[in-house]
Image (spheres, rainbow, N blue to C red):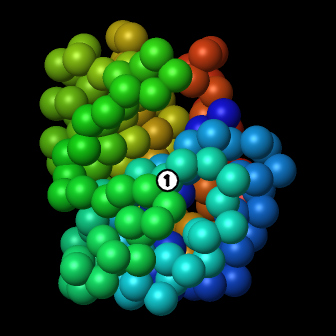
Amino acid sequence: MIGLMSDSHDNLTMIRRAVSIFNDASCDLVVHAGDFVAPFAVRELASLNGRFKAVFGNCDGEKTGLKMAIEPIGEIQEAPFAFSHAGKEILLCHIDFPVSQYVASGQYDIVIFGHTHKPEVKKKGRTLAINPGETGGWLTGTSTVALLDPASLEAEIISL
């Protein structure tokens, strides 16, 4: 199982809830699609039971601090970040443009993105595109994450 989150925007309470959900679901990987905002928020991710991968979002100004905070639990890169996991080709980005181009390319099994704060799961061809919504909940008043089964390519949006 893969845990997906995005746009946590320093909401420590919701990050803790997300970590609990991911650990309860035995996620071997957790992915963050950007906009942590400050490095101190990363401390809440230290209790994850799986590996961690992330990209910077448009609100992540202190990139050096974020990189140092994430280093003990995983990695963070500039978007787009392509990697393989559980036999699937995954592309992680933040801003929703050009997600449609990435999906249409057919190069990836899974495209994960954030930025819009709107949860979304859609499939086109062989590619599953997922926006887990906003973990922080500041913009919409709703905090969400997603759980992804890479074997079946099925994802579920979970309200925190």
**Residue 105 in the figure: left or right of residue 12:** left
Who's the residue at 46% across and 16% down the image? 87
Structural crowding at the residue carrying mark 1, measured as other residues with C-alpha within 10 Å and reported as few (<14), some (14–19) or many (≥20): many
Residue at the right extreme of this rendering: 24
**Residue 27 in the figure: left or right of residue 121:** right
Q: Which residue type carries mark 1?
A: Phe
Asked which secondary structure carries label 1, the reply is strand
Where does the image place residue 27, in percent across and percent down from the top left?
Answer: 68, 42
Where does the image place residue 137, in percent across and percent down from the top left?
Answer: 58, 76
Who's the residue at 28% across and 49% down the image? 93
Quarter assignment of residue 67? bottom left
Residue identified by numbered label 1: 52
Who's the residue at 74% across and 70% down the image? 17
15 versus 110 height, above or below: below
Image quarter hosting the C terminus: bottom right
**Residue 3 in the figure: left or right of residue 104:** right
Where does the image place residue 64, in percent across and percent down from the top left?
Answer: 22, 80
Image quarter hosting the N terminus: top right
Who's the residue at 54% across and 49% down the image? 51
Quarter assignment of residue 36? bottom left
43 versus 153 height, above or below: below
Where does the image place residue 97, in percent across and percent down from the top left?
Answer: 18, 48
Residue at the front extreme of this rendering: 72
Count all numbered tags in the image, as a single digit: 1
Could one spot residue 118 in this view of the protein? no
Could one spot residue 53 in this view of the protein? yes
112 or 118, nearer to the observer: 112
